[in-house]
Image (cartoon, grey):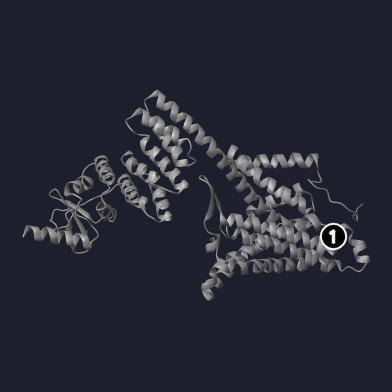
Amino acid sequence: MTFLKGTLGCLILAIAGWACAFTPEQALRIADGKSDDRIVALNEAVAAGDAALKPFIEALLADQVKVAGGKVFVVKGEAVLEAASGTAGKLPDDAQDVVNNNRMSQALGAALAAFNLSSSDREVRAKAIADMKDSVDEGLAGILAKAAAAETDPALKAQLELLEAAALISSPDKARRIAAATLLAGSGDPATGSLLMSRLADEADADVKIAIQRSLATIQSRLAWGERLGVLFTGASLGSILMLVALGLAVTYGLMGVINMAHGELLMVGAYATYLVQNLFRAYLPGAFDWYVIAAIPASFLAAALVGAAMERSVIRFLYGRPLETLLATWGISLILMQAVRTLFGAQNVAVENPAWLSGGVQVLPNLTLPFNRIAILVFAALVLCGMALLIARTRLGLFVRGVTQNRRMAACVGVNTARVDTYAFALGSGIAGLAGCALSQVGNVGPDLGQGYIVDAFMVVVLGGVGQLAGTVYAGLGLGVLNKLLEGWQGAVLAKIMLLVFIVIFIQKRPQGIFALKGRSAES
């Protein structure tokens, strides 16, 4: 009868995916007691390589384990099984849930990942290694050594060896700690640096401390390159946004001499046009939602260009040659546009979602991930710049704009409709501002005040680059973006902005024409 009960228990356990080798005593040590003792028992069981441990760990992580009367029970629905033995049992009334704190949960997750180190699927093994990085323990060193010896992939093998070293850094054996610290110097993971710093604070042996300090210095030196490249990329990303914003202003202010304080609001119009296109795709073309950005690009350009053309024909055309009046008039228009947006969409920011292909990023270094949306903005800014340069240099409209800019009276004498060219040029500059708004909607909040944060910086870019010079706009935009991020890392955001303003004031005093001076004849010469 006992044999039948045992056989039945094993059969039930086998159906549940368990095995009979796992003992109830081991289960009790893992499930009950202090966290340190439970982790030691868990690591001993994992090191023994008992496959029956895996479903028990899964049950612990799923909060399906209870303890009562020195026994451990696994409760799945209405089924109650005694842990390890697998015999069906009755759950006592005084049974208590097994509670796992964060440290215990991490140890259970690492132990569960350890079972996947021997998987035939490389991706499964790679994920197991990643899951173990933050909670590796000395008790897992044997399993990591065995997995490293059996690993055929060189990259995964190196990661396993570093994990083994991380596990042995807290070993009671001095020689093992020194060897582990030396081996960890080859890591480029920020978590390894944190581990060594933590271990350095607790280490009492002078020789081990020296080894840890050397490895830590090597890792920090390697990570510093990732931080530097990250600052450069962030600066280039900010610079590309400034360049996009300033490109439109380079036309309306640089080529036409209009101080357009509503330029930021034209950027906002482009961002809200992107928001509307997103909502239309979500409502009517949900299957093509990931491509709404492609449709939003021309929509944002047209929306901002139409608003700009209306501004030029109704107000600005009467104010050419009167910069103070254009400043005041466009400032008033900016207030009208912001209030109109608040009335239509509300004062709160609206949500613009990144499509799937712009979400996430590419990891270049352990501490450097380049977001896809930022990379896309860099590419987009370059394409807009190329299109703008070709338009100004190679098209009939560009020829007229350059002619009117350099000598309005002579252009009118040879039959150029200067009033129409002004409208087209202003609409072009406004449309480019709309494209900048479309790009900004993918990296920040979209709200009525969106343009206010960029209008001053855009004017600084145009003035620093040289009025009317597209090349100067590029150099100034990218240069100010990178310089701003470098100064922020050194002195903080507020002081960085002050230092930039001081730099621009000094530069303009020494070179009033900016980086590039406008070439050609003008009506005033």
Label 1 CA crowd tier, 10 Å (few <14, some 14–19, many 20+): some
Q: What residue type is labelled 1?
A: Arg
The quarter of the image holding the N terminus is bottom left
In depth, the one of 360 and 342 nearer the eye is 360
Among the 4 quarters of the image, the one containing residue 304: bottom right
Callout 1: SS: helix
Instruction: From the top left corner, tell me how far across and down residue 95 is, in percent.
Output: 16, 53
Residue that badge 1 annotates? 402
In depth, the one of 235 and 406 nearer the eye is 235
In depth, the one of 210 and 371 nearer the eye is 210
Q: State whether residue 215 is above or below residue 330.
A: above
Instruction: From the top left corner, tell me how far across and down residue 487 is, in percent.
Output: 62, 40
Instruction: From the top left corner, tell me how far across and down residue 89 is, in percent.
Output: 13, 59
Among the 4 quarters of the image, the one containing residue 137: top left
In depth, the one of 449 and 438 nearer the eye is 438
Instruction: From the top left corner, tell me how far across and down residue 200 is, in percent.
Output: 41, 30
Residue appearing at x 72%, y 60% in the figure: 330
